[in-house]
Image (cartoon, grey):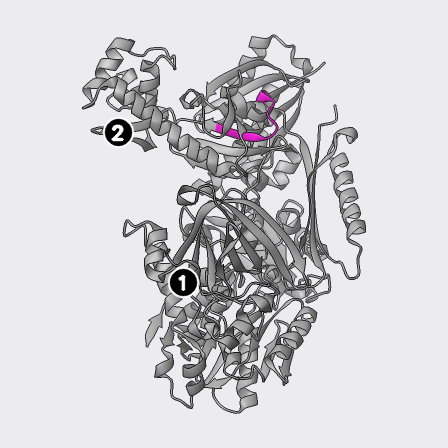
Amino acid sequence: MKKITIEDLEYISLGSTILGTGGGGNPYIGKLLAKQAIQAYGDVTLIKAHELDNDALVVPVAAFGAPMILVEKLFSAEEFYNAFDMMENYLGRKIDAVMPVEAGGLNGIIPFAVAAKKRIPIVDADGMGRAFPRLEMTTFTLHGIPASPITQADEKGNRNLYHTIDNTWGETLVGATTIQMGGSCAVTCYSMSGAEVKKSAVHDTISYAKILGESVLNAKKNQLNPISALMQQTQAFKLFSGKISNISMKTEGRWNTGICEIDGLEEDNGSKMEIDFQNEFLIAKKNGEPAAITPDLIVLLDAENAHPITAETIQYGTRVIVIGIKADKQWRTAAGIVLGGPEKFGYTEKFIPIELLNAKQ
Amino acid sequence: MFYKIGVDVGGTNTDAVLVSNADEIIAKTKQTTTSDISSGIENAISEVLSQSKIPKELIKYIMLGTTHCTNALVERKELNKVGAIRIGLPAGSAIPIMTDFPEDLKKMLEKHCYMVNGGYEYDGRLLNPLNEMQIKACLLKMKGEVESLAITGIFSKINADQEIQVKDWAKEILGDDIKVSCSFQIGGLGLLDRENACILNAALHGVALKMVHAFRATVSRLQLNAQLFIGQNDGTLMSLEQVQQFPIHTISSGPTNSIRGAGLMSKVKNGIVIDVGGTTSDAGALINFFPRESTQATEIGGVLTNFRMPDVVSVGIGGGTIVRFDHDVCTLGPDSVGFRLKEKSIAFGGDTLTLSDFFIADNQLQLNDVLQKRELVAKISSTLLISYEQALELVKTEIQQKIEKLVDALKNNADEVSVVGCGGGAFLLPKKIAGVSEVLFPRDMEVANAFGVCIAKISSEEEIVINTMCADEKEEMQKLLDKAKSNLLSKGAKQETIAVLIKEAVPLAYLPGAMLLRIKLFGDLNN
């Protein structure tokens, strides 16, 4: 059990952006929302999954919508409280703790606002350990935990309750109504017991995000290079060092997809890296050969200050370091690879773990 | 035949150029910036007039580049008492107005912040209607306590009607003299960034007014009857009326002016400009004679805004940069003696070793009142454990490496580019740089800034979100283009010079069919 203060939010917010692997929405808005809530209602208690009673009721909370909408039509916070209350009423019992569905990006930090307001703890775990573009792409799905019932609320006061036959339908239906609500809303889903959290969640992801953020933001204070400080904390693989040489983007269905090309510098001089993204970075290839493949995490960092770069802010000429982080082991099972691996995104490549791709010959 | 005068007011120097209508420089000067600003401008203009002997009646345009508004924000000086209204409840209540402002600025500005019902959805549907009673009650509270007002509505970029309605009510209650800034005219999508820019704009009205008055008064004291303009951050011009409405757009016009000025002086259309000053070398990329814009959010006086600023990379190399040696390891800066070169540096009898000392000793820089070469070399040597020749070599190698890194950071690809040097410290730049086809030093490079504002064009920009499932993208783009064009013509552009600077259609993630269209046009002044 640990108190999370407003200062901690700075670290968690940066760490969430790193875990966002280029997508997940910018946590800046989430950070402001959570800060306001903590100022109004006090610090939040972060608890480990093993501290939960097996029959405790845990409900994940998330923002759902388009990144562009989230920065224009800002949240009122009421939509989150409404979705939460609706779930509590529907289930007919008090919710004991909230949890992020997605540790990467905006949704890694939004649940702090609900935890502060409802004065309940937040569980140090999530359903991805990173960011993914669809509601059903969670480790909860791998354990057969239904997203349903799902509650949904918008800032105007509209509310919906969904019973869906599977988690993919959850994404489809909530996605469709979100557009009618004006492109953004709050959802709660995957309500589960403490025992289910222990078994199915990716553990310790909030404290991991905090450590990542601390290592980058405190590097200067400790006279360390922020990149090496981060590498020490993550046990990440340094995949490439270079400069953005081209970026091409288009929209397919609901997502921004594209390819980011990087020309090598220093030890990678003469080499080239290409990163495919669909909101998140999905495949990194060095000289045509895969160097990291989803669900393993691919992170693009500014070489100067180790701040993560999201797919929509990639800029020609930026000096970058590409790092890769092993996905949680649940993503590396056969079922995990079907749900979060390259074929789910339409690639023909097969998943190969990052440590094998980067084994020293 | 007519002439133009460009004036650039910097922290240290006020530069001026007198230019023909074919953009040839006839006269130039560097004067000291005065604390009242206007006498410095007056001196600079008088000097180019007397140098060139051009009759005053042939001066048709005078353009001013100034850091006035930037400084006012950074130093928190002379800011107006502002009121701020955000239209959009119930959305946005969790993140109030000025949430992420620096504390000191917030304290100065936050007394009258109100969030009221209203706003639109991204597709133009009404989010919430306005409540006249509620808004007028807020306005009444502000009466007599605010000098200017910032109005920001959710998705006002899609529909500005509510912002305009609130503006009308504000005039009704607060009187016609109240200065109102509406966000739809100030920034792009992204509520907080646009609202922040709108508030800063409102806070700058007084400063802008004073600046405009001073500029006008100076020009009329000189008995000039020219049309006056002020440069903005995208390399285009604003009339003095526009400056009073949108002072925020003058922020950071300095780097833009020097990049554009150096580009046109050297006839380099695409390349890299390095402006070497007393403390830093600032480099930017030129694309079609305009600076490449940065995609990163910009902070102004500690406040996050979404202004598109030129993408500038800096390194601590300037004329006053302090040079230190640890045996045979040479470190340049990053600190500098800055404008105190003439009292601090060894060449002027001081005790601080600067880059200028080496270049004077090496005969690459000629200045008055400096030590003789032999004496200077002896004095430099006395501070070193290695020979002067060895030290000079180390200094040059260090500059070479840093400048090469700087150039490399701005290059888009491995192709060789042209580099244009400018600014008072351009003598420091290496004559050969790896990955660079040529290093050019235009004749008038020390006044690139003033030249840059003098050749600025006028522009107009439009932005909209459309739904491609029910609207035709091409048709909508054409409408936007026509709107921008007629706006530009009404600002005084010459029809046949109008060209497209930016034309983009960006699909929006997670919103099927939604597309952001953006157009930016520019043209020459109608003459």
Residue A12 makes an appearance in the image = yes
Classify residue B291 as left or right of residue B465.
left
Q: Position of residue A302 (x, y in %)?
A: 44, 49
Please tell me which residue lies in front, B518 or A201. A201
Is label 2 in contact with label 1 (beta carbons under 8 Å)? Answer: no
Relative to B359, residue B498 above or below = below
Q: Look at the picture and state if A279 lies above or below B183.
A: below
Q: Classify 10 Å Cα crowding around label 2: few (below 14), some (14-19), many (20 and above).
A: some
Residue B231 in magenta stretch = no
Q: Chain of mark 1?
A: A
Q: Secondary structure at mark 1?
A: helix
Q: Residue at x 59, y 9 (%)?
A: B52
* Distance CA(mark 2)–CA(mark 1): 45 Å
Tag 2 secondary structure: strand
* Numbered marks: total: 2
Q: The disc labelled 1 sits on which kind of residue?
A: Glu
Residue denoted by label 2 = B324
From this view, report whether residue B64 is shown above or below residue B118.
above
Q: Amino acid at mark 2?
A: Arg
Circle 1: is it few (<14), some (14-19), or many (20+) Cα within 10 Å?
some
* Residues marked 2 and 1, same chain: no
Question: Could you say which disc has been placed on residue A355 in the image?
Answer: 1
Left of B300 or right of it: where is B151? right
At horizontal 34% and vertical 72% (from top left) the residue drawn is: A3
Please give the range of residues in magenta: B265-274
Q: Give the x, y percent position of residue B6.
A: 59, 22
Q: Chain of mark 2?
A: B
B332 or A27, which lies in front?
B332
Residue A211's spot in the image, x, y percent? 35, 63
Residue A243, percent from left and from top = 48, 44
